[in-house]
Amino acid sequence: MTLMCDVCKRTAGRGNSKVERGKAKYLGGNGRKTTGITKRHYFINLQTVHIEKPEGGAMTSRVCTKCIRSGAVRKSVKRKPFTLAVNN
């Protein structure tokens, strides 16, 4: 399946898109009335990133942003950070 996270194996979810009319009761109306329900998909936010393998090295993989933010994967460093030479 193409729309799947390589780390946590999350896929797209399914649900309903609801269309309503009317004014809410707490705002002084008679209440909201449902006029239409349509099936829809909730797609996950996949990013193609360079990640470090657990055994060493790097690879490209499609990872969801939830795994990137939580620290489940670690992005690989393409080059060493710039440092100034210290003359002593």
Image: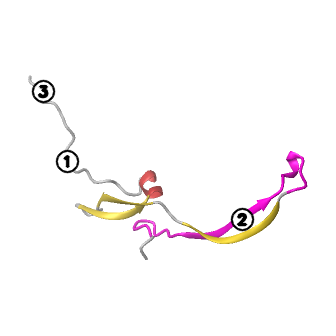
Residue, far left: 88
At x 34% / y 54%, what residue is drawn?
74
Using the numbered discs, state the Cα–Cα distance from disc 1 to disc 2 in whole angstroms. Answer: 49 Å
Residue at image mark 1:
79
- Mark 2 or 3: the one toward you: 2
**28 within the magenta span:** yes
Residue 71 locus on image (x, y percent) = 41, 53
Magenta part of the chain: 4-31
Structure colour scheme: secondary structure
Residue at image mark 3:
86
Asked whether 26 or 69 is in front, the reply is 26
Left or right: where does residue 5 sit relative to residue 60?
right
Mark 2: secondary structure: strand
Mark 1: secondary structure: loop
Give the crowd class for mark 3: few <14, some 14-19, many >=20 residues within 10 Å: few
| Type of amino acid at the residue the image marks with label 1 | Arg
Residue 14 locus on image (x, y percent) = 60, 71
At x 33% / y 65%, what residue is drawn?
61
Give the crowd class for mark 2: few <14, some 14-19, many >=20 residues within 10 Å: few
| Type of amino acid at the residue the image marks with label 3 | Val
At x 75% / y 69%, what residue is drawn?
36
**78 within the magenta span:** no
Asked whether 15 or 27 is in front, the reply is 27
Residue 14's disc is: none
Left or right: where does residue 3 sit relative to residue 88?
right
Residue at image mark 2:
18
Give the crowd class for mark 1: few <14, some 14-19, many >=20 residues within 10 Å: few
Q: Earlier in the sequence, mark 2 or mark 3?
A: 2
